Structure formats: C-alpha cells, structure tokens
Image: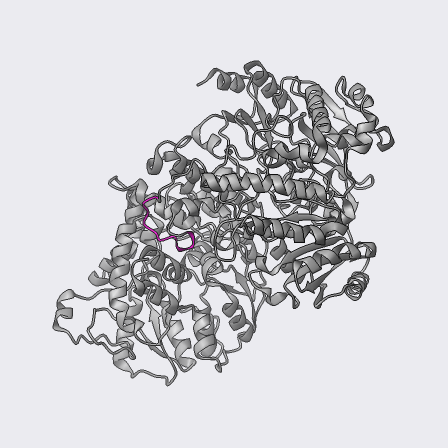
C-alpha cells in the first residue's frame, strides 16, 4: 500500500480504491482519451473532499472530479486521484416549490431531480440526452444544455449559488456581486474590463473557455455563473442551489420533414420567434427506420407547450404552417412523443457507427455557430469532411446552432491520427470564421482546449491561465484541461489496444472478427447506468440491482479494454478482476438491443469464460447447469424422473445436491417431467395420423420444453394444428435422404442406425457458462441432424425465447465457418411469428382477459415481440407486459452467490407487475426461467402464450389447472 493510499484511508470516511478494478473503471470517459489514475475516492461529504485535497496537495497528486463519466472531451479522466460523487454525494438536499429552487449534491442524477420536482409542476430546465444518468455536478462542470435550451438556456442560466472547496482547502459560497470570489479575482477582472467586453462572441451556445464575462459589473459579477463550465479546474463543487422552471402542463411535438439537412438547418432559426421549447435536427443516416417519421431525408423536432393539450397542439400546428416542409406530423400522445425522442436521444450512440458499420468517434461533437449561420456552416463543414476523406452525420440542437457529429477518424494508425489533427485545426478555423464556439455543450477538455487561441486569441487565453492561477495556484485540479492543455492527439484510448487480432472463438461478424473492435464499441455514453427502465427496456439489470459501475455494461467493457491493454489489468484472460465483474452479468442480452452501439456483453462474457477456464477446473455450476441437457437426457433414458423428484424433495438430500452442484441454497430444484414432450409426441403419433393441410412447421423440442415444461410443447402442437399447420419434430438420427413432413425419423442409411439417436440442442447452457468447445460440438451435431430440414421450406418453431435467440445469434456467430448455421438461424421463428406468417387467415380464440408478466429479455433483445403483441391483441389479451429481466436468467439465478441480485432484478418490474395486476389477469411468461422465478418468489404460475391459447380452444377453459409434469 502506497503512502498516498494509506493517508487517504486515514483521512476520509468514504471508500478509497487503489485496486485494479477501481482504477480500470475510470481510465476513460465517453471521449477518445484514456488516462490511468493512481486511485479513486468516493467522498461522503464536503469534509471528505477537503481531506482528499489536503492529502493530494501534500503529495503533489492532481485531483479530478467525476460524475457519470459521460464527458466526451476527456475532462473526466486523470492520472491522479479521481473523485466519484455518484456513490454518496448524490442526494436532493432540499426542494422549495414556492421559491422554485432545489439544493442538490454533485452526484445527483438529473432524472432523480426531475422526478422530485414533477409533482409540483416544476423541472430543471437543461436536459442533455444523457439525462437518465448524467449528474448535476457534471452538468455544472461542463455547463450542459440539452434539447430545451432554446426555452430554458444552459445550466449556468439555472444556477443560483454554489458551494465549492478550492485546491488549498478554502470553502466558498459562490453567488452574485462577487460572492465567494477567491482573493485576487476581482482585482484581476477589474484590470481587464475592455477585453471581457469585446473578447467573447455572442451566441446562445458559447461553452468554450472560462465564462469570465459573467463577472462584468453589468452582468451582476456572478461568480457562480462564471464557475459553470470550468470543467473541475477551478474548485470542487460540493453543493448547488439551482433554479427550477415551470413545466408545461401539456406538450405537442411537430416533426418537420425536409429534403436534406441543410434545408432543415436553414429553417430552424426561423421557427424561434414562434416560441418552441425545442428545435432539434437529425438526418436519415441516424434513423434505423423512418417509418414513424414524415417524408423527408432530414427532420426538425419542434416541441411546444401549453396549459392544455389543445393549446400545445395549436402551437405545434402553427409551427407546421409557418415551416416550408416536405411533410409534417404533429404528435400529442405522450407515448408517441417518447418513442420519437428516443430516436433522437440514442443518436449519440448510433452515430458511432456509419451506415456501412465502420467506426466513428467524438472529438468534434458539439461546435456551435449563430443559428442564422447554421445552414451555411453545415455546407462548409461537409466540404471540409470531403476534402479530408472523412464522413460524419450532423445532428443536434439546430435551434441553437449547435451540431453534434461523430466522424470516422482513423485513430489507430499514425497517418490517421495526423489527419485527425489537421482536420481539427482546419475545423477550428472554420467555426471561428462563422462566429462560433469550438464547444457548444460538452466543454473543451483535451479535445479542443489546445485550439482555444484560434477562437479567443493569445491574450484572452493568457487571461484564462491567470484566472486558473488565482483559483488553483498549485495546478492541482484537472491539469491539462482548458489552460496549458495536453495535445489533442495525445493519450488516445485506442493506442494501447493490440494491433493484431485476438484469437477468439466467436466470429464477431459486425466487427470484422476483431474482438478489440467489439470491445471498442463501448464509447461510454452509459445508457446502461440508467437507474430505472421504462417500457420494454432491459439493460442493465445487474447495475440497477447493485448500483456499482463494474456491474454495468460500460464498466465491464472498460475492464475488458484494460485487459487487452495489459497495463492496469495484467493477467489477460486469467484476470480475476474481469471474472468478478462479469460474474453478475445475467447474459440477458439487453445491451445487444438497448445499448445505442449494440455492445453484446453476454457474448463477451462467454468468450472470456471460455479462455479464463481453459485447461483449468471450472466451478461446479458450470458442470451441473452448463451441462444440464446431458443430465436430463440421462434421466429421460433411464426413466428416473420420478425418483429424482422424490430424492430432491428430501431436504437433506436436496441441500447436499445443491452444495455439490454450486446451486444457491435458497433455490428449490425444479421438478422434472415424468413424461418428456418427445415421448408424448411419439405416443400421440402412433395413435393418430398427422393432421392439417397447411404449411409444414418443425417444432423445436428445446431442453426446457422437453424435460421441464412439456405442457408448453403439447399446447403449441394443439394451437399450430388448430391453425391448419402440419407439425413435425426434428430428426433424431442423421439421415441420408430423409422425409420431413410427419415427424418420423426413418433411416435410409444403415450406418445411421450405428450412430445412435440424438437430440437437437441450441447449445445455450454451454455458451452461457463459456464451454464453447463443447457448445460447438453440440451445435455441429445439431446441424448434422437438421440438414434435411434445411433443404425444405419449413420454418423451425422455437417456443423457448432463450433457445430461439441462441439459434438466431450464438450458433451462427460461434460456427461462423459453417454455412449451415446461418441457414438454420434464418429459419428460426417464434410461436407468434409462425402463426402470423404461415397461418395468416387463422383467427385465435377470444380469451378476453388482461395480461400481466414480462417480455422475455432475449425476446426483447434478439427476436422482437411485435408478432406477439399482434397475436395477443387478436386474442383479446389486453394490457402490456413489463420490461426488465426476471433475474433468474437461466443458470444465473440458480448459481450460489447470485440469489440476492436475482431477486432484486425480479422485484424491479416483474413481481410488482404481477402483484398489481387484476385478479382476472393471465400471467404470461414464455420463458422457463421467468415461470420458475414467478413460481419460486411469488407462488404464481406463469403461462406460455401457447398454453393460454390452447386452453381457450378447449371451450374457453383458460383456467384449466392441468399441468402434466
């Protein structure tokens, strides 16, 4: 333990982390930069902050204040001690609705403030797209703005007073009329009044540099306002008094379609006299699907407010009439507005991938020009991109002249980095030529501070340095930012990654087979740190359960990045730090869809476990649950399910079995079916001829349906045949030229009899435990069996969502060298998709009941649930299913040490939705894990949609309790 760490532990009451994980998690923010800190401290109050500053000052170690780490210019990283305010100093201290003020700590997340103020009809004005995780301290440090700045300005416009600790330990209360100014600041400013009055461009989004013009006497000598945007270089914020604004009672959203982005940009300034709350712009490049938008190739989102829905709509329609548009749409329904805003908010992530899948990066994310100049500036900007052979798609705050853009810089090679520098220098000159600011929202950091002389001139930048000297004479706070900056092309986070491809098992098709590129996907926007989810969203349940960065998708990606870098995490694939962070990953795959850049942590976890345990002894749970299909097949062959059930019902035996199998002692071992689904199928086939004249469908007997929930398979057969479809099961022997049509598996090749019978398997349990060699063997055997099916037009119907997701994604990505894997993946359909595509004229029975439950996380992330929604609607099953994850997640919730997190995930959305549902509700749970979690934690029987429809076909007997085990 170093002397610095020892003294910090003695001086502060909060956590002090100098371990590998603590340091690795904060080497990066959402920028292109990386710095390795000495340690991390989570202070509990202002006294802790002062103590940290005192110890670090004595040792000459710099200090960096950090909120959510979503800064994109590099100002939330450092080589000294990082202060993490999100763990403890994250409270709303006071709320005064009468005065319209709130007292907040720096680690308070913006959405928590908005939730507290909403019942009083109030809100905090600025709202960056990261509102669900960004902190008030970070917003003040960067002077953040957001989409409503045309109405409510920047964070500086919403600050009244700030409590600050200086680098030398002085505690100041900053406000107007020089309140809290450090000694010497007023005298310095009084001597430079002429420069202050003439040296700052007038535009709504000038964020670059220090806001020293706020100290002019005619502007109230507002020290608090001048502190905003100082990026933690002047003092450390410990508390803030902020102003609130009245929230409109109703809102409407006018979406205006234009032929291109230049036309949209030129129109934006003309809408401002009509008083919109927002004027946001984006082009078609960033829209996954324009189906919900009016015609056009670029759009403006103009939001209006009013005392009533009618007043808000009237204002939106007035904007439409005043705008020269290709097409327009006015949306008043809150759900519809949220869906449209999500498209815009996710742009900061989706913009990191070009349409062809290549990477794009921040660095010139938020330049701002006078709004009237925006159209001209965008044309010049596009020309500059073309001159350098670069691509990027602008979007952002068109009404304020502030443009966000991610550019496909090559930051991996020396020529690419040199071009990045040349472009940056020329773009700075272009912005200044249009009267703009290098930063219009996110601050200068390391990305732009070096170029501030182009905007302000040497004299003004020299004054910035003198101001820094007054506040922080020892240059202790965030050195290298704003003044005396580090070069914009130094400390790039990609430089430490291996140049040669890493030997991996999965194919990573979206990343060119490069695991480093897959890990690079995480750009740090931290949507995974959202504390609550809405709608059907899933990501990231483990973070919401623990609140720890290492249990977020971003945190795990950072640890993998450092594992590849080899500087902080030095054990490579053997790293215990990476293993421990991934241990609480539920492999829910939520990040695959909810992360704006589609980070796939479930796949990365499987990859890591594969290498980590290569040639080593695995945990018992990997054998007991990872090889579950093998054990269950043995039970089925020996017909000992009843005996196993009887033995596990004896508590001492069950305890011993759980201990040996690495199973959580709190869990009950599920009962096995005494007659498997396949055995029922064979008996039924022998008793009756195949029915139906419609399309042939092959029903996949997954492990869970086969051995644990055969009632689901029987119900699916009942419904599929009622819809007129012919049902078959996959072959159980490898056949030369087998028929597929009646489920029979007749061998035409004598050698096939010698090979023995087998069962298809998606390999899910092997993948989730990182047993990828075994998974590949299982998958190849499955492809051998499925070859005759691949040669037909028959779809493969998979009832278990996790197995369907594995067949759609894991199989082709793990067997990327076998073309049969992609062919099988293309055939996979869910139960609802099968009925919709292959029995479109069939009308399901009327159930006419409300539903409760949860959309399976793998269904949400990989398969989609649109067909399920339509099928439920046709069956008169009303209501919506909740989002999130059930928490059991296959083997995860059964593993020893996971029970607490597993139940916390269930308590977030699933269990409350079931408890709050009307008594007449049908509890839907298509996944075996979801049904098991409901049964074990709530004593509720969840049903697969097939079971509900099958029961309704039997004269409406939806309440039939028969469940054959």
508 within the magenta span: yes
From the viewer's perspective, is residue 937 above or below residue 218? below
Please tell me in which quadrant of the rendered image residue 951 appears: bottom left
Q: Nearer the viewer, residue 188 or 489?
A: 489
Task: Please identify the quadrant where the C terminus is shown.
Answer: bottom left
Would residue 870 be found to the left or right of residue 164 on screen? left
Describe residue 486's horizontal placement relative to residue 371 as left or right: left
Q: Nearer the viewer, residue 281 or 632?
A: 281
Asked if one can make out residue 673 in the rendered structure from this viewpoint, the answer is no
Percent position of residue 430, x then y: 67, 44
Say if residue 174 shows up in the picture: yes
Residue 686 x/y as whole percent: 25, 79
- Residue most extreme to the right: 218
Nearest the camera: 955 or 68? 68
Residue 57: name its quadrant: top right
Quadrant occupied by the N terminus: top left
Q: Residue furthest front?
A: 387
Residue 712: give x, y in percent of width and height.
Answer: 39, 68
Q: Which residues are magenta?
A: 502-511
Q: For the stretch drawn in magenta, what is the main secondary structure? A: loop
x 79%, y 57%: residue = 270
Return the residue found at the far bottom.
693
Q: How is the image coloured?
A: one colour
The image quarter in which residue 177 lies: top right
């Amino acid at each position: 333990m170093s002397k610095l760490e020892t003294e910090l532990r003695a001086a502060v009451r909060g956590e002090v982390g100098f371990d590998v994980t603590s340091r690795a998690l904060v080497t990066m923010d959402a920028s292109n930069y990386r710095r390795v800190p000495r340690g991390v401290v989570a202070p509990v109050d202002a006294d802790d902050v002062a103590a940290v500053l005192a110890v670090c000052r004595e040792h000459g170690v710099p200090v960096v204040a950090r909120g959510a780490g979503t800064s994109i210019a590099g100002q939330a990283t450092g080589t000294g001690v990082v202060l993490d305010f999100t763990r403890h100093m994250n409270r709303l201290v006071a709320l005064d609705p009468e005065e319209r003020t709130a007292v907040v700590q720096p680690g308070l997340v913006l959405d928590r403030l908005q939730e507290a103020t909403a019942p009083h009809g109030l809100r905090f004005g600025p709202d960056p797209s990261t509102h669900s995780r960004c902190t008030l301290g970070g917003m003040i440090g960067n002077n953040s703005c957001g989409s409503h700045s045309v109405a409510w300005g920047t964070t500086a416009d919403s600050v009244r007073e700030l409590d600050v600790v200086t680098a030398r330990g002085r505690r100041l209360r900053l406000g107007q009329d020089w309140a809290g100014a450090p000694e010497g600041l007023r005298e310095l400013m009084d001597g430079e009044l002429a420069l202050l009055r003439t040296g700052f461009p007038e535009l709504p989004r000038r964020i670059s540099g220090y806001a020293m013009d706020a100290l002019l006497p005619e502007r109230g000598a507002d020290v608090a306002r001048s502190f905003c945007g100082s990026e933690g270089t002047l003092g450390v914020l410990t508390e803030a008094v902020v102003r609130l604004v009245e929230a409109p009672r109703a809102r409407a959203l006018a979406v205006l379609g234009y032929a291109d982005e230049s036309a949209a940009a030129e129109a934006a300034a003309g809408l401002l006299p009509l008083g919109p709350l927002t004027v946001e712009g984006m082009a078609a490049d960033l829209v996954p699907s324009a189906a919900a938008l009016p015609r056009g190739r670029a759009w403006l989102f103009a939001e209006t407010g009013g005392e009533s829905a009618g007043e808000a709509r009237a204002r939106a329609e007035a904007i439409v009439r005043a705008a020269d548009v290709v097409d327009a749409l006015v949306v008043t329904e809150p759900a519809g507005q949220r869906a449209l805003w999500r498209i815009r908010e996710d742009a900061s992530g989706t913009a990191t991938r070009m349409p062809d899948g290549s990477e794009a990066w921040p660095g010139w994310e938020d330049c701002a020009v006078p709004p009237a100049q925006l159209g001209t500036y965008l044309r010049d900007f596009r020309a500059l991109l073309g001159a350098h052979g670069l691509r990027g798609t602008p979007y952002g705050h068109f009404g304020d002249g502030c443009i966000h853009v991610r550019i496909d810089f090559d930051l991996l090679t020396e020529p690419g980095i040199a071009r990045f520098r040349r472009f940056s220098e020329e773009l700075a000159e272009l912005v200044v030529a249009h009267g703009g600011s290098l930063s219009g929202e996110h601050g200068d950091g390391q990305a732009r501070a070096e170029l501030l002389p182009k905007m302000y001139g040497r004299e003004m930048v020299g004054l910035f340095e003198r101001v820094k000297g007054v506040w922080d004479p020892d240059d202790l706070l965030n050195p290298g930012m704003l003044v005396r900056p580090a070069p914009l092309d130094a400390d790039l986070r990609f430089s430490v990654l291996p140049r040669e491809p890493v030997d991996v098992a999965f194919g990573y098709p979206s990343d060119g087979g490069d695991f480093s590129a897959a890990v690079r996907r995480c750009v740090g926007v931290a949507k995974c740190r959202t504390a609550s989810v809405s709608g059907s969203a899933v990501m990231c349940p483990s973070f919401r359960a623990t609140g720890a960065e290492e249990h977020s998708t971003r945190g795990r990606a950072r640890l993998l990045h450092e594992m590849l870098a080899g500087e902080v995490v030095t054990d490579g694939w053997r790293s215990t730090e990476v293993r421990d962070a991934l241990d609480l990953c539920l492999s829910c795959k939520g990040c695959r869809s909810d992360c704006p850049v589609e980070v796939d942590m479930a796949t990365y976890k499987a990859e890591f476990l594969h290498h980590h345990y290569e040639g080593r002894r695995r945990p018992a749970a990997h054998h007991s649950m990872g090889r579950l299909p093998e054990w269950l097949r043995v039970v089925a062959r020996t017909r000992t399910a009843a005996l196993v059930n009887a033995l596990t019902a004896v508590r001492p035996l069950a305890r011993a079995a759980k201990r040996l199998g690495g199973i959580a002692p709190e869990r009950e071992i599920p009962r096995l079916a005494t007659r498997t689904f396949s055995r029922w199928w064979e008996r039924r086939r022998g008793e009756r001829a195949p029915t139906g004249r419609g399309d042939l469908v092959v029903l996949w007997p997954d492990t869970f349906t086969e051995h644990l929930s055969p009632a689901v398979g029987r119900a699916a057969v009942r419904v599929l045949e009622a819809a007129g479809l012919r049902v078959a099961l996959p072959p159980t022997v490898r056949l030369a030229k087998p028929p597929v049509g009646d489920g029979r598996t007749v061998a035409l090749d004598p050698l096939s009899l010698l090979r023995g019978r087998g069962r298809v398997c998606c390999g899910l349990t092997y993948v989730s435990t990182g047993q990828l060699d075994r998974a590949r063997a299982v998958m190849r055997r499955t492809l051998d069996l499925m070859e005759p099916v691949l040669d037909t037009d028959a779809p493969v119907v998979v009832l278990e969502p996790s197995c369907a997701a594995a067949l759609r994604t894991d199989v082709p990505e793990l067997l990327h060298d076998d073309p049969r894997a992609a062919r099988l993946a293309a055939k996979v359909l869910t139960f609802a998709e099968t009925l919709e595509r292959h029995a479109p004229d069939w009308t399901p029975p009327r159930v006419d009941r409300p539903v409760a439950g949860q959309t399976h996380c793998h269904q949400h992330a990989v398969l989609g649930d649109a067909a399920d929604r339509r099928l439920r609607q046709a069956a008169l099953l009303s209501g919506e299913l909740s989002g999130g994850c059930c928490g059991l997640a296959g083997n995860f919730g059964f593993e020893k040490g996971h029970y607490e997190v597993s139940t916390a995930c269930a308590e977030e959305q699933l269990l409350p939705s079931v408890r709050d549902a009307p008594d007449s509700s049908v509890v839907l749970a298509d996944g075996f894990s979801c049904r098991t979690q409901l049964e074990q934690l709530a004593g509720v029987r969840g049903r697969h949609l097939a079971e509900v429809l099958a029961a309704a076909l039997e004269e409406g007997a939806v309440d039939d309790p028969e469940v054959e085990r």
